[in-house]
Image: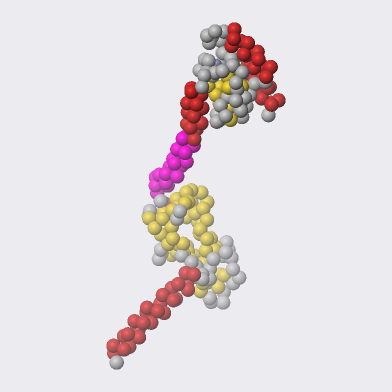
Amino acid sequence: MKSKTFLLLLMMALFVMPGIASAQENDPDLPLKLNRNFGYGGLGKIQGRFTLEVETLENLSRVEFFVDEDLIASVEQAPFEYQFHTEDYSPGRHVFSAIGYTSDNLVLHSAQISRVLLTSEDAWAETRQMIIPILGVVGVVTLIGLVVPFLLGRKKDFKIGAYGLAGGAICPRCELPFSRHILAPNLLVGKLARCPHCGKWSIVPQATGKRLEEAEARFRAADSPLPVESPSEESLNRLLEESRFEE
Ligand SMILES: [Zn+2]
């Protein structure tokens, strides 16, 4: 007889208790939110200043806020909220919850909000872990943009009059014509390209046919590449002017 009672209690413990526990978790009566005031918050990990907030319900007269099992605040009027800093508590996982009391003696439970509190050093480390791969990707893309046209540009020798799909450009330093590579990165006023004559990197717009003819004449006149003075303000203005008309 005794063992039967024990078995019955055991069955109740196994079947009834989890039922109560999950009912509390899945269907909270008290809507509790954790809002960030400032700091770090990502993937269940937080650092900084946060506010636990309970929506104001009818008849709600008091809200108790808990961290783990400890009562941290009892608020007796709206707004029902409690602000804290993650450094107020030990680093690691903590569970936040709230219990509300109504004027007609109902006790309302909130869902449990589980978060890992980080130290500020850990939050920085996490931020770096997220940012560095992004910076890495940006860096690699930039590098490809620089290296690919450089490698492709080296294979081809300049042929007068042959400019390809991206059109011809005129080097702002040596003022000789060259073809812009179709894959070269576009940067606002033109494509980033390396002059095959003097080796200067510059942002060059597509040159007009007339200016290319002038530059071709200069190229024919000079048997070998001549180092010419650095671009004058006038020629830079002209480059900007032309790119404006062509876009
Ligand atoms: Zn040049």
Q: How is the image coloured?
A: secondary structure
Residue 20 versus residue 240 in the image, above or below = below
Most foreground residue, 59 or 180? 180
Q: Assign ligand 1 to one image quadrant.
A: top right
Residue 132 versus residue 147 in the image, above or below = below
Which quarter of the rendered picture does the N terminus lie within?
A: bottom left
Residue 62 showing in the rendered view: no
Give the left or right position of residue 28, taking residue 119 as reference: right
Farthest residue, direction right: 245
Give the left or right position of residue 140, taking residue 193 as reference: left
Count up the numbered dots.
Answer: 0
Which quarter of the rendered picture does the C terminus lie within?
A: top right
Most foreground residue, 52 or 64? 52
Residue 113 inside the magenta-drawn segment? no
Most foreground residue, 168 or 187? 168
Location of residue 125 in the rendering, given as x and y in whole percent from the top left corner: 40, 44
Location of residue 210 in the rendering, given as x and y in whole percent from the top left corner: 69, 17
Residue range (magenta): 119-140
Residue at 59 percent across and 11 percent down: it is 219
Magenta stretch: dominant SS? helix
Residue at 55 percent across and 31 percent down: it is 183
Location of residue 92 in the rendering, given as x and y in whole percent from the top left corner: 38, 55
Location of residue 116 in the rendering, given as x and y in whole percent from the top left corner: 41, 55
Residue at 31 percent across and 89 percent down: it is 4
Residue 29 showing in the rendered view: yes
Residue 124 inside the magenta-drawn segment? yes
Residue 91 versus residue 11 in the image, above or below = above
